[in-house]
Amino acid sequence: MAEKILTRNFHLPGSHTLVLYRETGGYAGLEKAFAMKPAEITEEVKKSNLRGLGGAGFPTGVKWGFLPQGHPGPVYLVINADEGEPGTFKDRYLLERDPHALIEGMIISAYAIGAHLAFVYIRGEYVQPWRIFGRAVAEAYEAGLLGKNIRGSGFDLDVIVHRGAGAYICGEETGLISSLEGKKGWPKLKPPFPAIRGAFGAPTIVNNVETICHVPHIMNRGAAWFAGLGTKSQGGTRMYSVSGHVTRPGVYELPVSATLRSLIYEHAGGIPGGRRLKAVVPGGSSAVLLTADEIDVTLDVDGLKNAGTMAGSAGVIVMDETVSIPEALMVVARFYAHESCGQCTPCRESTGWIYKMARRIVEGKGRKEDLDTILDVARRGAGTTICAFFDGAVGPYISYIEKFRHEFEALIRK
Amino acid sequence: MVRLTIDGKEIEVAEGTNIIEAARRLGIEVPHYCYHPGLSVAGQCRLCMVELGNNPRPQIGCNTQVAEGMVVRTDTPKVLEVRQSIMEFHLINHPLDCPVCDQAGECWLQIYYMKHGLYEPRMVDEKVHKPKAVPLGPHVMLDAERCILCSRCVRFCDEVTGTGELGIFDRGDRSEIGLFPGRELANPYSANVIDICPVGALTDRDFRFAVRVWYLDTAKSICPGCSRGCNIDVHYNIRRPHHNQGRRVARLKPRFNAEVNRWWICDAGRYGYRFVDDPSRLGAPARGRGDAAQEVGWEEIIPLVTAQLRRYRPDEIGVVASPKMANEDFFLLRRLVDHLGLIHVDFRVPPRTPGDEDRILIKADKNPNTRGAELIGLGPRPGGLDARGMLRAARDRRIKCLWVFHHDLQASAWPAAEVGDALRAVECFIYQGSNSNGVSAAAHYVLPSAAWVERDGTFTNFEGRVQRFWKAVEPLGLSLADWEILGRLGAALGLGPEPASAEACFKALAASAAPFAGLSYRELRDTGKVLSA
Amino acid sequence: MNARGAVRVEFTPEQLAEVRRLQGLYPDRRAALLPVLQLAQEAFGHISLEAEEYVAGLFDLSPAHVHEVVTFYTLFFREPKGRHVISVCHNLTCHLLGAQQVLAHLKERLGVEVGGTTPDGRVTLLGVECLCACEMAPMLQVDDRYEGNLTREKVDWILEGLA
Ligand SMILES: Cc1cc2nc3c(=O)[nH]c(=O)nc-3n(C[C@H](O)[C@H](O)[C@H](O)COP(=O)(O)O)c2cc1C
Ligand code: SF4
Ligand code: SF4
Ligand code: FES
Ligand code: FES
């Protein structure tokens, strides 16, 4: 079995404490980082092929490189702990079981990008994770790991832990920024991108919890080691959240070169009750659905992209043969209708409309035209919106119907 | 400057211009709802899509700034298809109640649907229901189902007035425009949201169902409500005289002037036109007070008034002009005053309650032409009395003939008794104005003036900008523009033939008053000119 | 404090001090709006219109802008809620593994519809989107706590624990 990096301490009692974190080699990466120039860290992260693990899969070092050079005002680091993508729960584990990994990663990342204030935006429902993480931050302050002149480095960093209030869209980085600013979580127009004009108008880097947790290890063991764990275009391991019809649902840390089949059948123990696999959502509910015979794909960003879907947040939802795909679509469509921020017209209007159609189909009141209307509305709306939320909804809308059209038609004929 | 091509046509525009504006310069319309040049860019309606270079995904024009060498297409099949889709999205939850909607005829949902929509309706599910016919404040009515959530009204209240009354509440397709429960939309500029609302969601409570917009004609004008001189359009109805209770002026709308009022006007100005079609209008010249009052024709009144002006010594006559009069009027009045050698001339009458003022448009001076009166020299002369001095002199019977233009002296800051005493004591009181008021009944001679929408003219605003206004409707009854009345009186007094038009008066003004030198109506164009001095 | 009915909408001096601290913490004081609304909800039980106006006053914001925020987020309660809130996840994984049965059982046990509060003010029952604990589906949140791998028995046990 491959080496665990992010989850290596998860089984240890007290894994959330500073003492244990230190005992298991924590904060060694920080020492190394402080010995480097900020630009060298960014370079190292680029070379590691670390890609964002929040959903978009954007190369982390490249993103950091977008910050304006020699910016006179403040620069902010924002940690996206708004985990909300259905099927995903890895960040919750990290916050609860290894909060100091995130803190160390934040210090290094902030140092690299020149930020002296970092925000951790935790979804409001995560009360336990927020408490545990908050305690870890307090511990870090007491130990001189946060605040002024961190460990004699001359580098200052303050951390503000901010709680969301119930809105999936606040996981989208600019929706998150709006929310952090005390507003509705309406995503912002791009350009300008956050790296140029983000939180409070200042250049801002938004990264996912898991992404940042990798940074200390990259410092510790080098970019080459990290890159070597993965594929050509994506380094490292990543945490797969597996749920649904599997014997052992949970979080699995695997190199991104692992296959979806091995994740489901080897790690998660396969489908219970000897039932057959019907479909898999490979990267959170916004990913295109894969059928049972499409799971021999690697789990890296490009592998899943080539398979016509996406790695997304690595939330893997497994559906066995008993599942009604039309019902699944109705549930997913309800989610998107409920969570659309309502700001832009195509998304606001069609998420509601598509949910109504999907529900009607499940209720046995579907019309022949409905399926093509859903497909057409989804396709026409795709790519026209302010943020990627709607494109995320389009993935399931289209793939559920295209790949399981017969199930829908059967309901409509009834 | 930046050069780019739009639909194959080259154009050079200033850096920072967006594609909607650049295209507009070429006469190409990029349909849009949420973008408004006076507000921040929101990018919400997604209608303004254009294709940029080789980018396979259409982009919104409102949030795309021009760049050197950019190649924009607004007419590709892809753009047209996206537009059509977006129109459908805008309409699926719309109640489609156009036959009973007051916005019909000026609704951008209708207009763009005809141009860019035209799909087969395929939404059969229950629409989202929202509140209808909700009064938001004294002027604005909301139909939330018709709202396309473009947020223009919200941004107006946030960015222009800074009052923030409106919000979009809830989210998804439950998103709803509204006020904080229990509050009102009653800021001094509230009705501008009606103008910028692209659909029939926000309508004018005053105008609702008064006249269908297709019966309206438009004349360019200047708001007479204060010394800002906001540019406006007068919408008037003479095609359906039985509509709107016979009122000819249906509404005033702001007219863009980058240097004066941009896109906005205040509510006081917008609704300040009611006096035009009001029963208090003076419809005919009249002589005699109280029961003896008798309407007469102009041929009769002019010689009577001239006789009075000749009867008194120049220092027994007082003239109180009004800063509501036009530059043309002032010019003829000045000529007449000089000709008669009058010394008691003024135009300032302080109001009882001082006017409100803000940093947006509203000026404390509620007169459109104080500056014009000053520049043309209708203030007190050396040795002459000011307006209040004239009243006192009238009471003491030193002034025997008082000629008051427009002012309701009873509404002034001066004690009513002082005004009453003066008017009772004076031998000859001439009142010239458009409407009867607290003093007009005391007049021995009434000269009825046309309202500003019934004539041509110019006002000079507080910063010395001379701006034209155009005649929209005929003078009511026998009333005449002040310059015409003054022209007739002047002719009768031997000042030569009466001028043929307001323009002729202005020409003569420009030839004789230094600050106006070189100006002409042509020169003033639609948006006026600032006097150099 | 959590009781239903009228609670005075005014922070204590200690709470006000916390408001000031939060307002000073961020680069822009408006950023403290969510935390302060969370505080208001704790203090007053729910966020009434009166509370929105009160908070708007603390931030020099228009009440409409506070109302926008309160109506946008699901964790702000605009009506009095029960002493306990049970939020049953009904998103995909939980749906696959029996969320509907969990909801049906709770509705029956509590005698309320989804969105309702028991007449004694004990429990408010909600259906919510993915709480990101799908590994323990079907699951719910009861107040601050996540409970997963739900069965009828486990749901009954959870209910018994609620005062
Ligand atoms: C609708 C939507 C929801 C998202 N939710 C999350 C989320 O819950 N957590 C997250 O880290 N990123 C989420 N993202 C991705 C973020 O926008 C952003 O790409 C990410 O936080 C960047 O961090 P990374 O580069 O480290 O992945 C979401 C994106 C969209 C469009
Ligand atoms: S795509 Fe949807 S979620 Fe994103 S900004 Fe538009 S309305 Fe909001
Ligand atoms: S009321 Fe009119 S201006 Fe306001 S958001 Fe709706 S459509 Fe736009
Ligand atoms: S005008 Fe550009 S998105 Fe609305
Ligand atoms: S689907 Fe219920 S917790 Fe994710």
Image (tube, coloured by chain):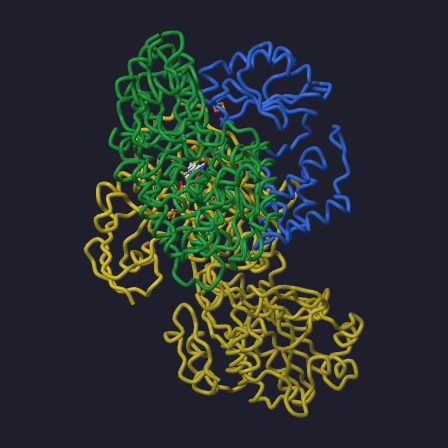
Look at the image and tell me whether residue B505 can be seen: yes
Find the residue positioned furthest to the bottom.
Answer: B383
Chain in yellow, by letter, is B
Q: Between A371 and C161, which is closer to the camera in this rendering?
A: C161
Q: Between B87 and A221, which is closer to the camera in this rendering?
A: A221
Look at the image and tell me whether residue B249 can be seen: no
| Rendered residue at 73%/44% (across/down) | C15
Q: Between A105 and C110, which is closer to the camera in this rendering?
A: A105
| Rendered residue at 51%/29% (across/down) | B129
* B269 in relation to B288, above or below: above
> Quadrant of the rendered structure where residue C69 is?
top right
Find the residue positioned furthest to the left.
Answer: B8
Find the residue positioned furthest to the front.
Answer: A23
Residue A385: percent from the left, percent from the top?
A: 37, 40
Report which colour depicts chain C.
Answer: blue
Residue A360 horizontal side relative to residue A296, left or right: right
Q: Quadrant of the N terminus of chain A?
A: top left
Residue B288: percent from the left, percent from the top?
A: 68, 70
> Quadrant of the rendered structure where residue B19 is?
bottom left
Chain in green, by letter, is A
* B82 in relation to C91, above or below: below
Q: Quadrant of the C terminus of chain A?
A: top left
Residue A298: percent from the left, percent from the top?
A: 28, 28
Q: Between B109 and C123, which is closer to the camera in this rendering?
A: C123
